[in-house]
Image (spheres, rainbow, N blue to C red):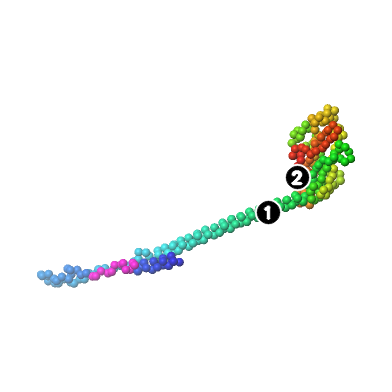
Amino acid sequence: MAAIALLWACTQAQPLLWAQTSAAPAPTQQDPAATSSPLPGDEFPQPHITVANPAPAPATSAWPLPDRIAWGANVLLALLGYAGIMLAVSTLRKIERQTRTAEITADAALAAAEAAQASARAILDAERPWILVTPKPSPTAENSFTITATNRGRSPARILASVDRVRFAADETQLPEVPDYDNEEAAAPMVPIFLLPGESTALKLFSRIEARNLCVKDEDFKRLESWEAKIYIHGKIIYRDLIAPANLQTHQTDWCCWYIHGRQKSGLVVAGPSEYNKHT
């Protein structure tokens, strides 16, 4: 507003300046020849003629009023344009700050959601059933063992299927990298098996007599007695969590045991590569 007031004062003072500097009308002059007395010998005197200077032209301004108005309007438009640009820049900065704030808020919400999901998963893992497979000596038969599945979790589980294999190998490094069951699918039990926390069920029985029956030749049995060959029993059990969501209900336990054949006593212990002993 101060700039506009200064511009208006300049436009009002300009005509006065030009009026003061314009030329004043010059005084009239008389022709000397016209006012002189007649010469001797002239019969008639010359007429008296007065020559006046031409009237001065009206004073004109060097900066017409329409041009001054146009210049003032351009200056005003420039000021308004500058103000609009500054307002737009301020608005864009506010939008940028709001965008950054929204991004920070979104990142925090995502981190909170991931933490909540991880906490929920930890709670589910803590409360879910965990079936572990271990060999146990038979209380009724000497040199006989029972491979048992036990629910070590905090919720019930249902056994859906299981499968097992017996293999001869020099050591566990000679076993296939991935357990091979000859394309045989895990079979469902004849009767549904539900295991409450702490309950167990027998998966397979193995004894010294069965080890001898697996050796077709006497040479194979001698290699077993001298530990040149070993018997590995491995398998998997598939079970269901009864309280978890549908997409997290099915789990699997892979297990492997090594049968140790002595001259008079035998043993069965957990052994095998990591691929043969894992839990999902």
Whether residue 279 appears in this view of the structure is yes
Magenta stretch: residue 20 in it? yes
- Compared across the picture, whether 278 is left or right of 145 comes to left
Q: Which of 175 and 56 is in front in this view?
A: 175
Q: Name the residue at 33% across, 67% down.
A: 18
Magenta stretch: residue 62 in it? no
- Compared across the picture, whether 226 is left or right of 38 comes to right
Residue reaching furthest to the top: 219
Count residues near mark 2 (Cα–Cα under 10 Å), then give few for <14, some for 14-19, many for 20+: few
Dot 2: element: loop
Dot 1: element: helix
Whether residue 166 appears in this view of the structure is no
Quarter of the figure with residue 70: bottom left
- Compared across the picture, whether 11 is left or right of 38 comes to right
Three-letter code for the amino acid on which mark 1 is drawn = Ala
Stretch in magenta: 17-28
Q: Nearer the viewer, residue 269 or 61?
A: 269
Quarter of the figure with residue 234: top right
Q: Nearer the viewer, residue 177 or 154?
A: 154
Task: Return the residue at label 1.
Answer: 113
Q: Name the residue at 38% across, 65% down.
A: 64
Residue reaching furthest to the left: 41
* Residue 103: image location, x then y, percent: 61, 55
Q: Name the residue at 49% across, 62% down.
A: 83
Three-letter code for the amino acid on which mark 2 is drawn = Thr
Along the polypeptide, which appears first: circle 2 or circle 1?
1
Task: Return the residue at label 2.
Answer: 280
* Residue 88: image location, x then y, percent: 52, 59
